[in-house]
Image: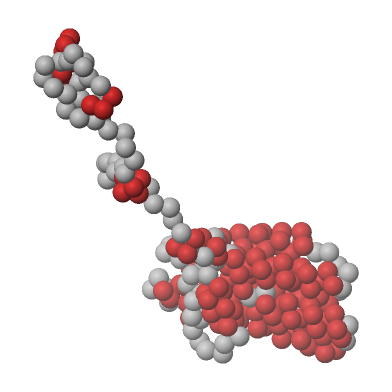
Amino acid sequence: MNGQPSWSDYGQQPSQGGRGGQGNLNFVSTSFEPGRAQSQPTYNTGGYTSATTSFDDEPPLLEELGIDIKSIFKKTGAVFSFGSTADGSLDSDLSGPIVFVFGLGFSHMLAGKVLFGLIIGWTIITSLGMSWLVNMLVGPGGDIGMHACCSILGYCLVPQIFLALFCLLVGKSIACSALALFSILWSTRVASRFVTVRLKAKHIPVEEQRSLLAYPWLLVFSMFALLSLY
């Protein structure tokens, strides 16, 4: 009335004849629309997506830790193979050797001998000494480090685990001594074969020096066998 907007005019374009510039006001309707509630605003993230990663896309835990179960079984099978080659021996890992070192310690623990510290200490010192000795014998280009020697020694302890378990069941006897001699020779043969395969991969002929490389390994595994016999 008298040019004033009424409540019924809200949401509509007011007339141009309003007083005090009120004709330029544009009131927005606040009525509810069902379709508007379902729509979500869109934001420009500059090319970045905020999608969450599903647990199904995560790699397995062992793969994240660098543990290859297939490789461990493959190299363990190479210990018991009669061939002249050792498949998988070129890959040096410590996951398998750690299991076998603690397996040997647990086998002695069943007999009442807690030798974990002694076994771990011998493994570290022997790996360091064998790395130095092999590189001195082979000369430049051999480059078999402590990591590789520790891996070779750990896998070759598998026969010593069977020896410890056999001595636990049978006790001190001639059969146990005979098995100890066999396990020493078997571990020495496998260790020298692993070293030879690694050196052949670097084009270093060491077939004539294999017996020389096997002698220090023979002494090493004799020490581990004495732990089971006494």
| Quadrant (top left, top right, bottom left, bottom right) of the N terminus | top left
- Please identify the residue farthest to the left as the structure is shown: 16
Residue 192 lies, in percent from the top left, at 57, 77
State the residue lying farthest toward the front: 1
Where in the figure is residue 96, as x and y percent of width and height? Answer: 61, 70
Can residue 153 be seen from the camera position used here? Answer: no
**Number of numbered tags placed on the structure image:** 0
Q: x and y percent of residue 63 in the render?
A: 51, 65
28 relative position to 225: left or right: left
Q: Quadrant of the C terminus?
A: bottom right
143 left or right of 191 in image: left
Closer to the camera, 194 or 57?
A: 57
Residue in front for this viewpoint, 53 or 18: 18
Residue shown at 61% from the left, 85% from the top: 80
Q: Is residue 216 above or below residue 143?
A: below
Say which residue appears at 41% left-offset and 74% top-offset: 201
The image quadrant of residue 156 is: bottom right
Vertical placement of 73 versus 84: above or below? above
The residue drawn where x is 54% and y is 79% is 74
Residue 18: % across, % down? 15, 15
What colour scheme does the image use?
secondary structure
Q: Is residue 60 above or below residue 221?
A: above
Specify whether residue 44 is in view: yes
Q: Residue at x 65, y 83 (%)?
A: 186
Q: Nearer the viewer, residue 9 or 207?
A: 9
Left or right: 16 with respect to 166? left
